[in-house]
Image (cartoon, rainbow, N blue to C red):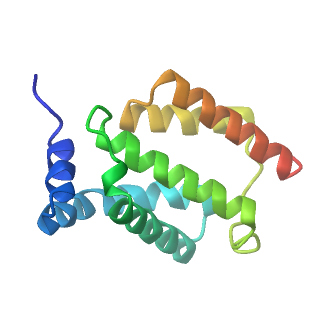
Amino acid sequence: MVQDPDVQLMLKFQEGDEGAFRLLYEKYKIPLLNFIFRYCQNKQVAEELSQEVFIRVYKKASSYRPDAMFSTWIYRIAINICLNELRTSKYRYECEMKSIDPHQSEKLIEAVDHISKVSAEEKMATEERLNRLQNALGA
């Protein structure tokens, strides 16, 4: 069975190889920044949240399980950070989120699914979070 090279890099990082983390950072920094920008529509905020994703990956590396694709794991972290920021309203006025209509949330979930092969359970959880977010924003 051929294993995802990102999984191999993450396992090396778990063993203390800082170079493996740098390679993962270089591979994912732009795609994650673009992904997060779609949430908040503000470059500076997207950059800050993107950095938070990598800080969390660095600090929580030991919690990564190699049975999951690395891309699924890192994008899940990104989604959670974005949703947390929206919930805590730290950037409420900077992140001018447009109402997320059902078609937009479907597109977002499809994008995550395509990028990281999200499981059906994760997909449903994301849909549920987006629906709660819509309700919280008064959409």
- Left or right: residue 138 versus residue 36 is right
Q: Position of residue 133 (x, y in %)?
A: 76, 47
Is residue 82 positioned above or below 72 on the image?
below
Number of numbered discs: 0
Q: Position of residue 67 (x, y in %)?
A: 28, 31
Tell me which residue sits at (31%, 53%) in the image: 62
Q: Nearer the viewer, residue 56 or 28?
A: 56
Counting from the top left corner in percent of width and height, residue 115 is at: 38, 38
The residue positioned 37% from the left and 36% from the top of the image is 116
Position of 106 with respect to 122 (left or right) is right
Instruction: Give the left or right position of residue 21, taking residue 73 as reference.
Output: left
| Quadrant containing the N terminus in the rendered view | top left
The residue sitting at the bottom extreme is 44
**34 and 7: which one is in front?**
7
**As drawn, 102 above or below 137:** above
Q: Nearer the viewer, residue 128 or 39?
A: 128
Q: At 64% from the left edge and 54% from the top edge, which residue is drawn? A: 83
Residue appearing at x 75%, y 69% in the figure: 92
Task: Provide residue 30's location: percent of width, then percent of height.
Answer: 34, 62
Q: Quadrant of residue 31?
A: bottom left
> Most extreme residue toward the right, as rendered?
138
